[in-house]
Image: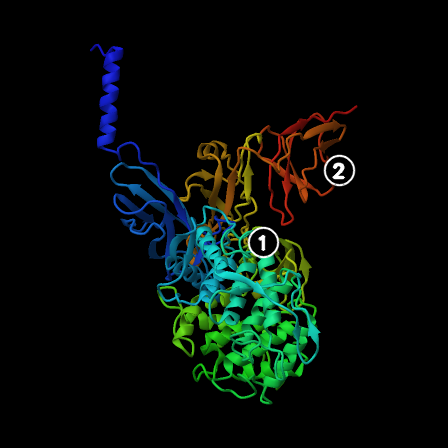
Amino acid sequence: MNIRMQKSDWFVGALVFIAGLCAFPNVGLAANPVVKTVPWVSGSPLIPHDTYAGKQITLKGTTDVQNAPWGWTWDFGDGTATASGTVGNRYVIEATHVYGGAVGTVYTARLTVRNSATGESSSKEYYVKVENNELQVQANIAIDEGLWYLHKTQTRTTSGGQDVGYWNSGNAASGYYGLWAVNVNAFEVNGHKKSGSPDNPYTETVGRGLRYLISLLYSGGIGSQANVIGTFNPDTDGNGKGVFVNQSLQFYQGGMFMDAIIASGTPDAVATMGPVGIIGRTYKAIVQDMADAYNWAQYDYAGGGGWRYNANEFPDNSACQWAAIGLIPAQRNWGIPVPQIVKDWNKKWLEYSQNAAGYFGYTDRNPVWGTMATTASGMVQLALDGYGRGNSQWDNAESYMYDHFGVGGGYGNDIQQYYYGLFSFVKSMLLHDSNGDNISEPIQFLKSSNSAKPLIDWYADPAKGVAHRLVSDQSGAGYWWGHNATGEQYPFETAQAIIMLQRTLFEAGAPVAVAKVTPNPGVVGQSIVMSGADSFHQDSSKSIVAWDWDFDNDGNFDAAGPVATCVFNALGDYPVKLRVTDNATPQKSADTVVIVHITVPPIGPTADAGGPYVFSPFMPKWFLDGTGSVNPDEGQSEPTKPGDTIVEYAWDLDGSGNFNNAYGPTPDVTTFFKLKGQGSYLIQLRVTDRTKVSFPSSGMENLFDTASTTVTVRTDDPNGIKNLTARAKSGKVSLVWTDTGAHHYNAYRSTVSGGPYAYLGTCDSTYSTYYDNNVVNNTTYYYIVRPAALNGYEIGGSNEASATPRLR
C-alpha cells in the first residue's frame, strides 16, 4: 500500500484530528492525577502506620481530581479483595481494613486513582506494620484515626485569594475560634506542619487552618499596669500593642491560639493574611504581642492576679488556665519574656483561691461548679509561676488530684471524666517546674500526700492511666465526644485527646524511641545487641543526639550510645528501657521498653535487613547486606540431627508481600533498583532456619523472621565521597578522602572489584584517613568508604579505590 501524503493531504488530516480533539476533549488530553497517602511520620513517609492483628484501621489518601469518571481502588497488600469507588471528595479517599499476620509483618497497600474514560492513573503506597497489641500501639492508632477525622471534617474555602480552612461540621466543630486552634495544634504536635512536605495531605490541612487562625487576630493598644505589688510595663517589645482574638471570650481563646502558632515550629514565618498589625509580621512577633496582651489584661486589684472574660476583670480559675497555657510555651519555647511581677501577682491569686482541702475554687476558695477543672487550672498556673513539688500549694493540689483520679462518679468527682480539666492536668504534669528556671520537669508518677499510697503512672497505668482511658473512649469513627460538663465543650475533645495521647503540647513533633534487639529470643550467655538507631524525631528539623539503656530495670542507665550489648545469664524475660533525647531547647526525651526473651532451643532466627541503604550512580555496584541476621541456636540440634542454621535469605523489594525478588545474604540489586529509578523504597528480608530437621521432636516447622529497611536511589550523592584513593605499601594500605562533614566513616574491603565488601572499621577523624594493616602483599584489594550519621546509619557512598601492597 502506498501511504505517501502530499502536504495538502497532511494539512487536511491535521484539521480533522484537531476537530476530533475538540469534539472529544477528554481523549488523550487528561493528565495523570496526583495521588497522596497520609504518612504516619511526616518527614519519614516510609515508617509504617501501626496496627495489631484483628484491629480495624482506616487507610487514608487524597487526590487532585473529583467525581466521575475518576475512580479509586485500595489494594490492601495482603491478598484480600480490593476496595473501590468513585472519587466523591478528593480530600477523603478511605477504606477500612483488618490486618492479620505475625508481629513485624509489613504490608504495602496501594491507592490508585484512575480515569475510567481515558485510562490515566496514578498510585501511591501506604505502609502498615503489625505490632504487639500494647498501649503505645493502641495510642498510635488512636492518634492516627483521630487526626484523619479532623482532616475529613475541615471546611475548605478561600479568603483573599488564599486557601483557608476551619471546622463548622462534624463532632469536632464549633463557632469558637479557639477550637479551630486546638484542632490545628493536634496535627502540629504530631509533626504535621504548614512547612511540611507537599506529598503529605496534612501539610495543606494545617496550612489552611493556620493561615485562617492568624487572620482572626487583631492588634490593639496596651499601656502601663499597676497592681498591689507595684507598677510595671506589660509591653515587653515596646511597640505599645497587644494582639487579641477577634471574638468574645478572647482571654479563654488566646492561649489556644498561642499554642497552635508556637507548635508550628516556625517563629520566623510571616503572616500572609490578617488586618494591619498582623499581616506581614513574624509569628514570634505576633505571639509576643499576645503574651503582652495577657500581661496587660491581668486583674489588678485585691484578690487578683488572674484572668477572666475581659481585660482587668475579676478572675476565675476556668479562664486563668488558658493564660498559663499560652504564656508557658511563649516563654519556654520562643524565649518571650513574662514579667516576674505577673507571675508573683498570679501566685497571690492562687493563694486566694485555694481551699484548705487542696482544690482550687472558681472565683474564690469555693467549688461553685466543680473542682476537677479549676484544680487542674491552678496547677498549670503554678507551673507558669515556677512552683512545683515541694511547694505546699502544688503538693496539696496534686494529692487532691490523686484522690480523684480514675475513681468514677462523673465529671464532678473524677478528673478523667472531665476532658476540659484533664487537658490542663496533663499539661501541668508535663510542664511542671519546681525551681522557676523555665525548664519543664515532667512528672511521670502522680503521688499522694499520704506516702503509704502507691504511686500512679498517670499516663500508662494499666488500670487508671490516661492513655487507657482515652483509647477506650474513642468512637469507632475516630472522634471523642461526651466527656465534659457541658455540650459546648464536647467539640474540643478530639483534638485535646490527640494532644494528651501524644504527650507533646506545643513542640512541632516529638522524639520517638525505637529499640531493636538481635537476636530476640536469645539463649543464656549470648551477646545480645540492642540498637536504638531506628529512633526518630517527628519534627524533621530536630534529631536524636543521645541514647541511654537500662538493662536491669532498676531505673539507672547502664550504657549509652545508639548500639549497646548485654549478656543475660539466666532464663527469663528482661525488660530493657531505651531513652532517647533530642537536640531541642530545652531538650525532650522519650522512652520505650522492649522485652528480651532468653529461652531454650528450638528458637527462631532474628532477621536484620541492614541499611538504610543509599545508592548513587558513582558506586560500582549496589548490594544489600543481611549478614547481621542471627540464629540464636546456631549449630544446635537433637542427637544425630544436623545443626540448626539459617537456610534461606529471601527479599521482597517491590512491596508485593512475596519474598522472591532476590536471595542470599548479600544480593546484588544494582539492576533491580536502577530500573526503579530515583526514589525511596521500603524493602523486607525474610530469614528461615531448619528447625523441622534439627529438632524433629518439637513438631515445629522451620521458623522464620522478617525485618524491613529502606533503600534510597539518588541521581546525585551530596553526602558521598567521590575522591577516595588507596595507597599501597608493604603490608598496609592507606585510604584517603576529603571530609564531607559526616559524623564518622565506615571502611569496607573486597578482593573482587565491585564487591560485595566486608566491613573493616571506622574513622571519626577529620583527617579522613584509614589504615588497613591486615593485608597480604601481592594481593589486590578494592575499597569503599561510606559516610555515616551519629546514629550509625550510612548516609552516602563512595567511589571504589584499589591498591596492591608489595614488598619493597
Q: Is residue 779 left or right of residue 610?
A: right
On the image, the x and y values in percent for residue 428 come to 58, 73
* Disc 1 residue type (three-letter): Thr
Q: Which mark is residue 767?
A: 2
Q: Is residue 486 left or right of residue 558?
A: left
On the image, the x and y values in percent for residue 75 come to 33, 48
* Residue at mark 1: 282
Look at the numbered disc 2 and give the secondary structure of its residue.
loop
Nearer-the-camera pick, 788 or 148: 148
Q: In this view, does 205 lie to the left or right of 734?
A: left
Q: Residue at x 77, y 28 (%)?
A: 730
Outermost residue toward the right?
808
Q: Residue 216 carries which label?
A: none
- Estimate how packed mark 2 is, as few (under 14), some (14 to 19) or many (20 or more) residues with alpha carbons within 10 Å: few
On the image, the x and y values in percent for residue 604 come to 49, 54
Outermost residue toward the left?
1
Quarter holding residue 597: bottom right
On the image, the x and y values in percent for residue 8 come to 24, 12
Nearer-the-camera pick, 574 or 798: 798
Q: Can residue 452 be seen in this view?
A: no
Query: Colour scheme of this structure image?
Result: rainbow
Disc 2 from disc 1: Cα separation = 42 Å
Q: Residue at x 46, y 74 (%)?
A: 419
* Disc 2 residue type (three-letter): Tyr
Of circles 2 and 1, which is in front? 1
Look at the numbered disc 1 and give the secondary structure of its residue.
loop
Q: In this view, does 620 lie above or below 455?
A: above
Q: Is residue 203 above or below residue 573?
A: above
Quadrant including the N terminus: top left
Nearer-the-camera pick, 326 or 228: 228
Mark toward the start of the polypeptide (2 vs 1): 1
Nearer-the-camera pick, 770 or 173: 173
